[in-house]
Image (cartoon, grey):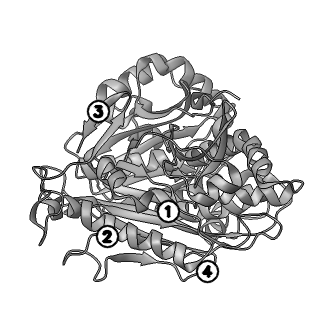
């Protein structure tokens, strides 16, 4: 079997400013999203882009327009005509855009029906919030449709309907998403868009407050921290009957990570061996190759879920067959649709004996929207040279999916992970399996205590443990790590291991892409 071309599974996802070349696709999307409503004219889009280019955003997936949003800046006044969409948006031309205003007003947000379910609206709302922070705007206001109301109009008023939606007693495809994204209901507007039959002409008046707003400040208020939220999963192995059951178990953790707005979620090494419980038992070497048959399903599932849940997914590790050679591979599924992979470099004696795994030959470091990261699979974290190479390539966070059967094995992983934090002044997160898989040889018992570790200094956790699971129960930990604090620690820490290396006495030398290199 030839190596899989990961580009076939990537969802190239780009959030960018709108361009006039998007016009035809925008009209097609409007007609699909709002049937019966008149779409934008070319003059509308040209005017919006000219007046406020930063406020007009689109999301592209594989070159196709999947979602868009439009906005302008106004000066907040209690008596402003929020109830009149035509007045507040200049009938869609936004020539009333006020660069010196204090309020971002959203005039439209839409997601193409083919791409719904991927939480693209959240991405656009988050981008608008970031724009408010960047431009030091006090708030964002939107007039939101309630397209589910027409189904209830005969038995309840619009007020009763939105109150039930806010109370979670009813679901509205727009209002539910908006309240989930931090908007507070401030009022109800009648005759907002008379042509909006699904909303019966009504709209909600919603507001999001920018807590970073500084009155009179000319520039964005800069955080003193640069937090990155990590979710690490302690995954229980249990017998299953199909790949769908495996996916359902993963979906639970992905959804939780998304709800907590995590930037990364880490699954354990070889947690896909759970799939061996739903195939006919055979010798371990053949079973490992049988597991590799799930690679296509595995790649399709996690690449789509990284987009849907807007989280960078380290999908544990999985057996992959390439040119009849079996590898243990960890994949990074970026929420921008990209996919990277790291081969396990050091193979344990049991992996070699039971499964016939071959080693990889390169330390990869991946660029993400939250900095540079590396993946070291279980045994690899026990070799300090690999983390040294990764840190030299710019990695600030090391993700370690591991799979150990005893407490001794787990302690080797944990102890070495904490040592790597001290040696290289990086963060390390580890994720392991718990539970049992009867009749699956070399994957039958598991021991884990997953966690997130820091350097040991006054700025960090007292014992270098930022967060840690209880041992041997299925659970997660969620914790924010601060990259700015890490950078300051490298410059001003009580000890500066990275800077104080005696490279005049020793170096790490390695081969990569046919070239000799050293750190």
Separation of marks 2 and 1 at Cα, in angstroms: 46 Å
Circle number at residue 503: none
Tell which of 302 and 13 is nearer to you. Answer: 302
Task: Please tell me which of labels 2 and 3 falls first in the chain.
Answer: 2
Q: Which residue is mark 2?
A: 454
Q: Which residue is mark 1?
A: 187
Separation of marks 2 and 3 at Cα, in angstroms: 31 Å
Secondary element at image label 4: loop
Secondary element at image label 2: loop
Q: Residues within 10 Å of mark 4 (few under 14, many from 20)?
A: some
As displayed, is residue 140 above or below residue 5?
A: below
Separation of marks 4 and 1 at Cα, in angstroms: 49 Å
Separation of marks 3 and 1 at Cα, in angstroms: 66 Å
Residue 353 in percent (x, y) is at 67, 55
Tell which of 518 and 164 is nearer to you. Answer: 518
Report the side of 17 relative to 151 (left or right). Answer: left
Circle number at residue 516: 3
Task: Please tell me which of labels 4 and 1 falls first in the chain.
Answer: 1
Judge whether residue 352 can be spotted in this image.
yes
Count of numbered marks: 4
Which part of the image, by quadrant, shows the N terminus? top right
Which part of the image, by quadrant, shows the C terminus? top left
Separation of marks 4 and 3 at Cα, in angstroms: 43 Å
Report the side of 150 relative to 226 (left or right). Answer: right
Q: Are marks 4 and 1 in contact (CB under 8 Å)?
A: no
Q: Which residue is mark 4?
A: 472
Residue 412 in percent (x, y) is at 46, 72
Report the side of 238 relative to 496 (left or right). Answer: right
Q: Are marks 2 and 1 in contact (CB under 8 Å)?
A: no
Tell which of 412 and 453 is nearer to you. Answer: 412
Residue 273 in percent (x, y) is at 72, 57
Q: Residues within 10 Å of mark 1 (few under 14, many from 20)?
A: some
């Amino acid at each position: 079997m030839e190596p899989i071309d990961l580009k076939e599974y990537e969802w190239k996802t780009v959030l960018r400013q709108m361009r006039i070349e998007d016009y035809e696709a925008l009209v097609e999307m409007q007609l699909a999203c709002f049937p019966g409503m008149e779409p934008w004219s070319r003059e509308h889009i040209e005017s919006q882009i000219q007046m406020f280019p930063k406020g007009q955003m689109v999301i592209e997936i594989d070159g196709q327009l999947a979602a868009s949003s439009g906005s302008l800046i106004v000066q907040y006044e209690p008596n402003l005509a929020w109830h009149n969409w035509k007045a507040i948006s200049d009938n869609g031309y936004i020539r009333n855009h006020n660069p010196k205003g204090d309020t971002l007003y959203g005039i439209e947000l839409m997601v193409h029906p083919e791409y719904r379910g991927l939480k693209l609206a959240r991405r656009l709302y988050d981008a608008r919030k970031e724009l408010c922070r960047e431009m030091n705007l006090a708030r964002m206001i939107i007039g939101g449709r309630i397209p589910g109301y027409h189904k209830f109009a005969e038995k309840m008023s619009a007020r009763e309907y939105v109150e039930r939606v806010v109370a979670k007693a009813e679901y509205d495809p727009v209002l539910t998403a908006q309240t989930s994204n931090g908007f507070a209901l401030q009022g109800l507007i009648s005759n907002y868009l008379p042509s909006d039959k699904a909303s019966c002409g009504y709209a909600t008046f919603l507001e999001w407050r920018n807590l970073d707003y500084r009155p009179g400040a000319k520039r964005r208020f800069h955080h003193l921290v640069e937090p990155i939220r990590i979710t690490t999963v302690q995954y229980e192995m249990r017998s299953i009957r199909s790949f769908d059951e495996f996916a359902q178990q993963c979906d639970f953790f992905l959804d939780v990570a998304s709800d907590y707005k995590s930037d990364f979620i880490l699954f354990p090494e070889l947690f896909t061996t759970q799939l061996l419980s739903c195939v006919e038992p055979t010798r371990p070497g053949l079973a490992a190759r049988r597991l590799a048959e799930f690679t296509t399903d595995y790649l399709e599932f996690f690449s789509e879920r990284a987009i849907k849940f807007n989280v960078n997914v380290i999908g544990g590790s999985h057996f992959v067959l390439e040119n009849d050679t079996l590898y243990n591979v960890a994949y990074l599924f970026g929420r921008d649709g990209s996919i990277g992979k790291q081969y396990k470099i050091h193979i344990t004696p049991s992996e070699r004996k039971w499964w016939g795994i071959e080693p990889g030959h390169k330390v990869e470091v991946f660029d993400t929207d939250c900095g540079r990261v590396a993946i070291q699979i279980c045994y690899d974290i026990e070799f300090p040279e690999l983390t040294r190479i990764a840190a030299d390539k710019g990695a600030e966070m090391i993700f370690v999916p591991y799979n150990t059967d005893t407490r001794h094995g787990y302690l080797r992983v944990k102890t070495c992970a904490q040592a790597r934090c001290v040696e290289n002044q990086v963060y390390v997160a580890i994720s392991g399996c718990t539970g049992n898989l009867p009749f699956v040889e070399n994957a039958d018992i598991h021991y884990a205590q997953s966690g997130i570790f820091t350097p040991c200094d006054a700025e960090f956790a007292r014992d270098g443990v930022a967060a840690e699971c209880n041992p041997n129960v299925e659970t997660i930990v969620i914790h924010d790590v601060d990259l700015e604090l890490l950078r300051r620690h490298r410059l001003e820490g009580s000890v500066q291991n990275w800077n104080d290396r005696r490279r005049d006495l020793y170096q790490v030398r390695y081969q990569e892409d046919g070239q000799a290199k050293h750190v």
